[in-house]
Structures are given as C-alpha cells and as structure tokens.
Image: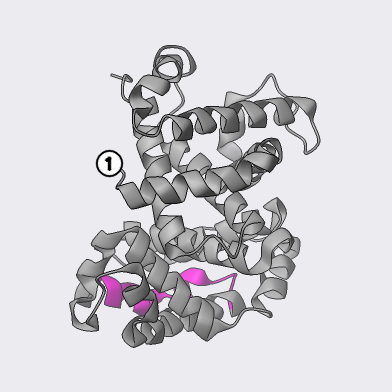
C-alpha cells in the first residue's frame, strides 16, 4: 500500500490546516481513545488520564508531532519513523489492534474540527495514511 | 451482551433525534465504499462507483444507505434487545448476503465519523463513546446468527 500523488497532496493540505491546533488535536485524540476504548488505558498506568491532565496534553503533543514528521517526510516515512518503529517493537509492545483505535479517534477528531474539509476522499486519504503509519510502527514486531 | 447505562441511552437518543436518516445513511454507505473499496464486492449491481464523487452521488448507494440507517433507528428503540431486533437481519446477512462481519465494524466506525462531521464540537468524547458502544453492539447482534 502506498500513497498516490493526490493522496499526498490531500494529507499535506489538511496537515497545514491542523498544525495550528496540533497540540489540541493530539490531546483530544487521546481523550477520545481513552473514553471509547477503555482497555487502551492499560498502557498508561503511570499517567493521570483525566481531561485537562498535563500528562495527557504532553503525550498528545508528542503523538501529533510524530505524525507531523511523517507528513513532512511523506515520500520516505519508513526512514522518518524508524526510531518510533524500534520503540514500539522493542520497548512499548503496544498490541497492533490499538493502532486502529488511535487512528479512528484521530479521524473523528479531524472530522469534528474540520467538518467541511473532511470529505469522503479526504477521509479515505487519511485512513490510508494512518494505516501505513501503523504498519511501519509494527513492522519490526516479530 | 452490550449494556447501556441510562445516561448512554439518553446521549444516543438525543443525537439520533437530530439525524437526517436519508442523508446520513447515504453518506455513511458512500464513505464505506470509498474508504474501503473492497466493500464494493457486495454491490455489483449498483452501477458507477469509479470515483468518490461517483460513489457519493450514486442513487442506489443513497437509497441503500437510507435502508441501512433506518434499521439502525430500530436498534435505538430497542437498546436492551439488540440481538432480538437484528435476529432476522443476521440470518439474512449470513445465509443470503454472505457478508463478512468485519464489514459491520467498518460501517459502524464510518457512521461515527459521519456523525462527527455533522455535529462537530457537540460530538464530544463522551458522546462518541456511547455511539461506539452502540455500533459495536449492532455489529455483534448482526453477527450473532452466523453459523
């Protein structure tokens, strides 16, 4: 699976719009993840996960910044994400099913913030992008 | 079995009251067929689905989407008995339509995203959580009679 030129343009254009509120989007994505998929909280026993928590905010920023790196290096995401790929494989061991949940919550967040922009083709491009990011992050699992 | 608190039931009904079933149904099915093109395998007779705009504008897609979402409406009236409500539809999807239940999960999540675009900030994490529970419950109910 790889992104077409059109899909890359769509992803970059939405990224430009969302980067202004990147932190808020990252935080909200995690809030949605922890509300809808309670089991994901098991990866964060050391965090205060209540809305407004500084740890939630910091981690949300981190996640969305990493996605920004992927977007900026959209022609070579494998290289850009290699450290994170190692981290998830050798240290975090996040079960792969959870990447789908996080991806879905990001799309929901984008949909609520940019309803007019989040058309069917934009939805498709971002779903594909997140699917590719997820597969890169789980590439070294075994 | 999925159990809904009375708060979750209120959240679901409150939002549902504001949903345009025809429009939302068409959009949901259209997005499913666009974002996950392999789902088109069930709809050979629908005609032109060669691009997102063809799919979203396709009258058969819209009509069928409306049908599907109307059925969801039934679920919302019977949140304590999703399995009973969907028993016949479950048999239909297994025996006649041969639909992989994974598609129910995909459709449910697409519906959540469509609701998010329509309701914006009103579609809070709490509202989403109640709806994720609903779409999950419907997916499970639809798969229940598979054999």
Q: Nearer the viewer, residue B28 or B127?
A: B28
Is residue A99 among what the camera can see?
yes
Tag 1, which secondary structure?
A: loop
- Look at 34% across and 25% down and name the residue there: A78
Q: Is residue B145 above or below residue A142?
A: below
Judged by its main secondary structure, the magenta piece is: helix
Label 1 neighbour load within 10 Å: few <14, some 14-19, many 20+: few
Write down the quadrant of residue A74 in the picture. Answer: top left
- Look at 72% across and 74% down and name the residue there: B14
What residue is shown with label 1?
Answer: A2
Q: Is residue B59 above or below residue A63?
A: below
Q: Nearer the viewer, residue A138 or A66?
A: A66
Magenta residues, as a range? Answer: B78-94
Chain of the residue where label 1 is placed in the rendered structure: A
Question: In the rendered image, which quarter contains the C terminus of chain B?
Answer: bottom left
Judge whether residue B51 is colored magenta: no
Position of residue B112 measured from the top left corner of the image (x, y, whole percent): 54, 62
Q: Nearer the viewer, residue A128 or B123?
A: A128
Write down the quadrant of residue A142 in the picture. Answer: top left
Q: Is residue A66 above or below residue B56?
A: above
Position of residue B60 measured from the top left corner of the image (x, y, whole percent): 32, 86
Q: Nearer the viewer, residue A64 or B109?
A: A64
Left or right of residue B104, residue B79 in this image: right
- Look at 68% across and 62% down and name the residue there: B120
């Amino acid at each position: 699976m790889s992104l077409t030129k059109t899909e890359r343009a769509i992803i970059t254009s939405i990224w430009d719009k969302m980067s202004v509120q990147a932190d808020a989007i990252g935080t909200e994505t995690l809030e949605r993840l922890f509300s809808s998929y309670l089991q994901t909280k098991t990866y964060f026993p050391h965090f205060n996960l209540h809305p407004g928590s500084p740890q939630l905010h910091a981690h949300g920023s981190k996640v969305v910044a990493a996605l920004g790196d992927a977007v900026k290096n959209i022609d070579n995401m494998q290289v850009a994400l290699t450290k994170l790929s190692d981290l998830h494989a050798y240290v975090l061991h996040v079960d792969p099913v959870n990447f789908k949940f996080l991806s879905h919550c990001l799309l929901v967040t984008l949909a609520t913030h940019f309803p007019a922009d989040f058309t069917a083709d934009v939805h498709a491009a971002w779903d594909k992008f997140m699917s590719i990011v997820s597969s890169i992050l789980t590439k070294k699992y075994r | 079995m999925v159990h809904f608190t009375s708060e979750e039931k209120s959240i679901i009904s409150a939002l549902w009251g504001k949903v345009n079933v025809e429009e939302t149904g068409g959009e949901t099915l259209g997005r499913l067929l666009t974002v996950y093109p392999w789902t088109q395998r069930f709809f050979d007779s629908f005609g032109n689905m060669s691009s997102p705009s063809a799919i979203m504008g396709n009258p058969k897609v819209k009509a069928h989407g409306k049908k599907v979402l109307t059925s969801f409406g039934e679920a919302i009236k019977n949140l304590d008995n999703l399995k009973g409500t969907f028993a016949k539809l479950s048999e239909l999807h297994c025996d006649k339509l041969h639909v992989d239940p994974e598609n129910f999960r995909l459709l449910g999540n697409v519906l959540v995203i469509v609701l998010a675009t329509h309701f914006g900030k009103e579609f809070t994490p709490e509202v989403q959580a109640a709806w994720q529970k609903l779409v999950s419950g419907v997916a499970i109910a639809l798969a229940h009679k598979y054999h």
